[in-house]
Image (cartoon, rainbow, N blue to C red):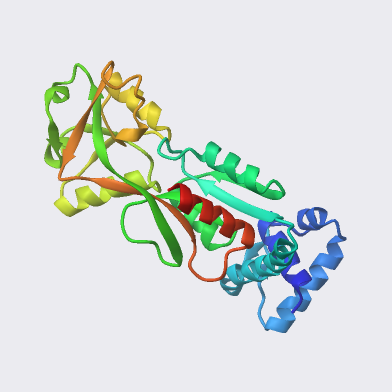
Amino acid sequence: MELRQLRYFLAVVDEANFTRAADRLHVAQPGVSAQIRHLERELGHALLDRSGRTVTLTEVGAAVLPYARAAVAAASATRDAADAVAGLARGHVGIGSVPSAALDLVELLADFHARYPDIEMTMTELSSEALLTEVRTGRLDLAFVGLAGDSPSGIACRVIREEALVAVVAHTDPLAEKPTVSLRELAARPLITLPRGTGIRSALDASFAETGLPAHIAFEASDPQVAARLAHRGLGTAILPASEVSQDDAGELIRTVAITPRVSARLALVWRAHGPLSPAAGALRALVTVRA
């Protein structure tokens, strides 16, 4: 088994097409096909299903995928470690994040770049559920996600912040004058919340499930500020962390009301539980730990 074969395999998986993978690798398409066939013969199993319009993973291929990514990453990390000893802080780190006002990701990445200017960084924003999948499969090294319960399977994490969710209503809403609102009261109202797959939504759904009360989700908004604006216009009660509510709006157009019993969500930095981080990703994780 050669690293070249694993790299070709990963390229075909990422592109879902042999020709595009060959273009990305700057090699001839027959060479990519031949190397992957050699890999499949060596493993004794087909890794790719070539029967459709796009190339997909077989069951064995899906099982092999994270190990292939880890092997290629480890080879790259070996070079990075040697360079680091020689004073050459190079490498690459892929990071993902949910949109969050509780995390100043721009300042974090700028600080990291100032310390390690030769490390290449790439960043993507997705839902927490999608980010966890990207970390598990090795597409991302690190990700900031929202968590509602225990650390997910195969994932290690460091909690950056835990925050109670609040009900956000228009300043003219009768609820605006109350210090707290119960889940039973919220169950009788149209709610505005983030989509499924986010930590905030998971925390809300879990709380309603524990009480046996149904939640009437009237609107889903991926942007917390949009959810707050919908609440301001009287279209429902938004459920958000207080930090996601614009301070310009709070006290002017909307009110935040504490929820009882407490409903909270956590913002956490996550990475794969198995296998070492690359030196570049380890350096970024260490910086997050210092700044947290």
Q: Position of residue 40 (x, y in %)?
A: 71, 77
Quarter of the figure with residue 244: top left
Out of 35 and 161, give the one closest to the viewer: 161
Out of 247 and 212, give the one closest to the viewer: 247
Q: Position of residue 251 (x, y in %)?
A: 26, 19
**Vertical order, 88 against 200 (above or below):** below
Q: Position of residue 184 (x, y in %)?
A: 12, 40
**Vertical order, 47 against 136 (above or below):** below
Whether residue 3 is visible here, answered yes or no, is yes
Out of 217 and 168, give the one closest to the viewer: 168
Whether residue 130 is visible here, answered yes or no, is no
User: What residue lies at 38% left-to-right and 46% top-to-bottom?
Assistant: 196
Out of 287 and 122, give the one closest to the viewer: 287
User: What residue lies at 42% left-to-right and 35% top-to-bottom?
Assistant: 101
Q: Position of residue 281 (x, y in %)?
A: 59, 57
In the image, farthest residue toward the right: 28
Quarter of the figure with residue 154: bottom left
Q: Quadrant of the N terminus?
A: bottom right
